Every structure is written in structure tokens, then in C-alpha cells.
Amino acid sequence: MSKEKITMTEGLADIMPPEYQELVATATYGKEDRGWKDIGSSKELIEQHSLCAGCPESIAFRYILASLPNPEDTIFVGSTGCTSLVFPHVAVQNIHSLFGNQNAIASGLKRALARRYPDKVKDVVVLAGDGATVDIGLDMTMQSWFRQEKFTTICFDNELYANTGGQESGLMQKGFVAKMAPSGKNFDKVRLPEIAREAGCHYIAMLTVSKPGRVEKALKNAIMVAREIGPTYLQLYTPCILEIGKQSMEGLDEMKESEEIGGRFVMKEYISDQAQELIDTLAAEEKARKKAAKAAKTKKTVSA
């Protein structure tokens, strides 16, 4: 990892906007152990956004952006929805696809990048809402899994169509009444994590974004497994507080309640045997690296 992608040309540095100069100075690009704890000190982790005050999606975006292992060589593929309002604010390459075809776009992109940069790691991450992932785009989502495309799909599960008035989605709870679903949904929430497993995903996690450490670990696992083995899927509960009648400060409480024992978003993981072997290997390598770094630091301190 490096900051080469955002470094300014020396002759133009004095005329670059102060926001960009601060980005170069504070970016976590090049930091080997970047993670959610960098939020608040780095420009590329969303200084500002155009989502509603207190929106859990803005929390999720920050954790995801902070946890990318290779941000300067990562390309997001987004879809129409609340998420598309945030992409212009982040210092990560991104593509805005049509509503529902994000996994098809990501498939072609990942293959093209592999041909264009055969000796370089290029991560592709799809990020879309439940409407684009489960309803309009379900066929293209599943077909990418069937083909074993090597990228990560992230679904921001609002449990309804959040930015078009509150229509029901496949991930809405049975019986839930929304502004544009006044009679209540008449079928159960689609079990997409189970579908993802049957469709061939090697790492799957369903969780809320109330605990940043969990989000960071799940995202890094998903991206590393997708690099080496095959498709991965994350389903993150990011409730639309406006549509479910909550105040701006109640999003975190809503997520915590939904992940309590017996709740519908108690964290669940599925890891294939291949993926588990890779995750264990990477964990052992990280532990050895940190141990060596600690030993070197101790030696340096004693010598001084």
C-alpha cells in the first residue's frame, strides 16, 4: 500500500485546494493496520455526507472505508439509492451502475482489471441496498455467485425502499407496515444469507453496524477470501430511522436491539473450508508480524 495515487505534483502543491492537501497529509493509504479506529482523523473516511442526520448507513460507510485493506486499489460498484449519495464524497474509485445490475458491472470490471493488471491486486466491492440486491438485481447478484466471480457483495439492509417513500422490499419483515405498504408485508423476510451459501459464496456474514470491530473483521475476511477463492457476501442492517419512526439518535439503539439473543440480526457467519484455511493462515501471519514488530520496538528501546 502507498500514497502514490494521491500524492501531489510538487509544482502544483501550492495551488491545490486545502481539502486535498489535508487528504494527502492524513490519509490512511499506506497504513498496514488501518481500521475503524482511524475514523475522525482521516479525510477519506467521510468528513461530510449528504445522508440524513443519524443515518446508520453513514456509520456503515465509515467503518467499511476505514477497513478496506487496499483502498487505493479498490473500486466500489454502487447502485441507485441512498448509498449513491455518498460515493462522490469519498476518496475511493467508484462506479455508479444502473439499479440492480451492479453485480453484472462488477463481474466485467473484475475480469478487465485482472487482464489489465495481472501482477497487481485490484479489489472490487459491490455496495447496494436491499432493493437493488434482493429485488431488482437478484438474478444478476446470484449469477455472479454461480460463476464464482471474485469480489465482495455488501447489502445495506434497510428492510424497505428507504429513498423512494417506504415501499416494501424482499428483506422487509413480515407484517411490517410502511408509508407505501399500508396493509403490511404478507411474506417472510427473504433469507439471502442462506441463498448466498447455496449459490456458492465462500464467506457470508449477517450483522448490524453497531460494533465497529465486528464490521472491520467481517469486511477484511470477505475481501481477502474474495481475492483468493471466490464470491463473498455481507448483509449489514442499516435501518432507515425516518421510515421506521425513530429519532435521529435512535439508530444505534435499534441496531443493538435487533442483535440481542433471539433477534433477527444476531451475528451469523458461514465460512467454507477453503475460506477458513485462508483466514487461519492470514491470522497466523498477522500475529507473527505484530510479534516481530513488538520485539523490534522493545530491542530498540533497550538499546536507546
Image (cartoon, rainbow, N blue to C red):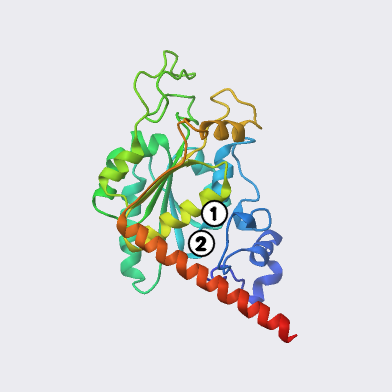
Q: Tags 1 and 2 in contact by the CB under 8 Å rule?
A: yes
Q: Residue furthest bottom?
A: 303
In which quadrant is the C terminus drawn?
bottom right
The picture places residue 300, in percent across and down from the top left corner, at 69, 83
Left or right of 291 on screen, residue 303: right
- The quarter of the displayed image where residue 135 is located: top left
The structure residue drawn at horizontal position 24% and vertical position 52%, both measured from the top left corner, is 147
Is residue 23 rendered to the left or right of residue 1? right
* Of residues 100 and 300, the one drawn nearer to the viewer in this rendering: 300
- Examine the image and state in which quarter residue 8 appears: bottom right
Residue at point 35%, 24% (across, down): 188
Report the disc number at residue 96.
Answer: none
| Residue projecting furthest to the right | 304
Residue at the disc numbered 1: 65
- Element at badge 2? helix
The residue singled out by tag 2 in the image is 71
Which element is circle 1 on? Answer: helix
Q: Around disc 1, counting alpha carbons within 10 Å, would you say few (fewer than 14), some (14 to 19), or many (20 or more)?
A: many
Q: Nearer the viewer, residue 76 or 80?
A: 76
Task: Say which label, 1 or 2, has the lower sequence index.
Answer: 1
Residue 234 vs 229, above or below: the answer is above
Query: Hey, what amino acid is under mark 1?
Result: Leu
Residue at far top of view:
183
**Looking at the image, is 154 positioned above or below residue 225?**
above
Decide: is 40 above or below 168. Answer: below
Residue 4: in sight, yes or no? no
Give the camera-side residue of 289 and 5. Answer: 289
Amino acid type shown at disc 2: Pro
In the rendered image, residue 247, in percent from the top left (x then y), is placed at 64, 27
Mark 1 → mark 2, Cα distance in angstroms: 8 Å
- Rate crowding at label 2 as few (under 14), some (14 to 19) or many (20 or more) other CA atoms within 10 Å: many
